């Protein structure tokens, strides 16, 4: 075991995490108050079935997923971040400069030892599977070492629909909404004592969503959301980020009859449902065929089944990032990109 892991084990033997009553602070602390001066602490958040308590604003946070990282960066917390991991796309452009100052521990899921080497006092994640050994066991691993963890409320397991050891690829009986993203922003802002920044960011996302949604009425337009894989493609079901996007623009997801987040289907099924347009993720990873946009388009135009689809013949391809198709702040980006494409193709009218 490396020295950092030994330090955390020793720290646990000296004192465990103190769970206290929920505090609050009306101030927006930009200076990173320490434990001796932090007013309104400890703060307790009820998070995915467990209480998470911090005795002061965290100073050394590791974020284990891109979505969580982009929220922290959007709140201006890069000076408190000591590591990020699990990336699918380039960081959002407006966050690139801040992100350059934060160490990247791994492009994929890092080991517990790698995270502990960064000596975090707080760990955040978008998916339960990203935390340690995954799920409740993974969170226990960190918290037994005195490191509180926070799991995004957007995670499928967080709502209690499936085991929190699962990932967001299972069925959603309760559709995802942007309210869970706003909740995550506000809770992290409370933990880090930057509540005013949190409210400003939520208001910005709400305004962008409203502007994009009110710019189109795509009644009669059908969409299919393709994440990856050319052999048996992952197409979004009804109730994840695709549901928010289609509802916002007034369109219909041709796979809205399944609550699975990312069911794998056949191309014959996609062709039979004949979507007006294909929303396609351009992924920076290169783990399977169909990650890169170029491979997606090459496949669609050469395959005897897909090449006959109207969306392919008319090149109705709406290009988004992979993160735009996951429950994140990027869902709003997805709404904007889909609305813009539908307007350009004259497939939607402004709402009256």
Image (cartoon, grey):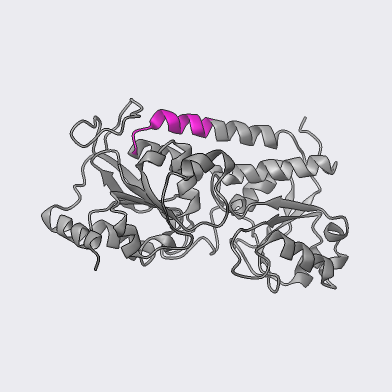
Residue drawn at (55%, 57%), measured in percent from left and top?
A: 88
Q: 91 and 37: which one is in front?
A: 91
Q: 139 and 12: which one is in front?
A: 12
Q: Position of residue 9 (x, y in %)?
A: 19, 61
Residue drawn at (85%, 73%), measured in percent from left and top?
A: 304
Q: Position of residue 99 (x, y in %)?
A: 47, 44
Quarter of the image containing the C terminus? top right
Find the residue positioned furthest to the left: 14
Instruction: Say left or right for 200 vs 315.
Output: left
Q: Quadrant of residue 10?
A: bottom left
Number of marks present in the image shown: 0
Find the residue positioned furthest to the top: 27
Q: Quadrant of residue 265?
A: bottom right
**Residue 135: in sight, yes or no?**
yes
Give the main secondary structure, helix, strand or loop, of the magenta stretch.
helix
Q: Position of residue 169 (x, y in %)?
A: 54, 63
**Residue 187: in sight, yes or no?**
no
Residue drawn at (82%, 67%), measured in percent from left and top?
A: 306
Instruction: Say left or right for 337 vs 197.
Output: right
Q: Is 193 one of the magenta-colored residues?
A: yes
Instruction: Say left or right for 138 vs 254.
Output: left
Quarter of the image containing the N terminus? bottom left
Q: Is 93 one of the magenta-colored residues?
A: no
Instruction: Say left or right for 97 vs 340.
Output: left
Q: 301 and 237: which one is in front?
A: 301
Q: Position of residue 156 (x, y in %)?
A: 49, 57
Q: Is residue 251 above or below residue 296?
A: above
User: What's the magenta region?
Assistant: 192-203
Q: Is residue 324 above or below residue 10?
A: above
């Amino acid at each position: 075991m490396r020295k950092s892991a030994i330090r955390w084990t020793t720290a646990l033997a000296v004192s465990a995490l103190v769970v206290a009553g929920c505090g609050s602070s009306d101030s927006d602390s930009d200076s990173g108050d320490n434990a001796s001066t932090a007013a309104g602490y400890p703060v307790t958040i009820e998070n995915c079935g467990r209480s998470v308590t911090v005795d002061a604003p965290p100073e050394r946070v590791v974020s284990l997923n891109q979505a969580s990282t982009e929220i922290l960066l959007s709140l201006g917390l890069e000076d408190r971040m000591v590591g990020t991991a699990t990336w699918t796309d380039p960081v959002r452009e407006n966050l690139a400069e801040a992100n350059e100052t934060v160490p990247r521990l791994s492009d994929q899921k890092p080991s517990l030892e790698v995270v502990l080497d960064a000596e975090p006092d707080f760990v955040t994640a978008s998916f339960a599977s990203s935390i340690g050994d995954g799920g409740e066991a993974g969170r226990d691993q960190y918290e037994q070492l005195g490191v509180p963890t926070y799991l995004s409320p957007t995670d499928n397991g967080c709502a209690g629909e499936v085991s929190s050891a699962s990932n967001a690829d299972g069925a959603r009986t309760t559709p995802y909404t942007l309210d869970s993203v706003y909740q995550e922003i506000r809770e992290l802002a409370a933990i880090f004592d930057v509540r005013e920044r949190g409210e400003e960011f939520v208001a910005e996302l709400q305004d962008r969503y409203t502007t994009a949604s009110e710019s189109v009425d795509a009644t009669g337009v059908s969409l299919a959301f393709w994440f990856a894989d050319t052999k048996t493609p992952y197409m979004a079901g009804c109730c994840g980020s695709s549901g928010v996007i289609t509802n916002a623009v007034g369109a219909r997801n041709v796979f809205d009859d399944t609550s699975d987040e990312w069911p794998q289907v056949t191309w014959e099924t996609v062709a039979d449902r004949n979507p007006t347009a294909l929303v396609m993720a351009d992924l920076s990873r290169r783990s399977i065929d169909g990650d890169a946009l170029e491979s997606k388009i090459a496949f669609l135009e050469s395959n005897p089944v897909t090449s006959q689809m109207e969306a392919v013949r008319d090149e109705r391809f709406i290009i988004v990032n992979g993160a735009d198709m996951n429950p994140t702040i990027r869902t709003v980006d997805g709404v904007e990109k889909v609305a813009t494409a539908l307007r350009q193709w004259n497939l939607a009218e402004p709402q009256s």
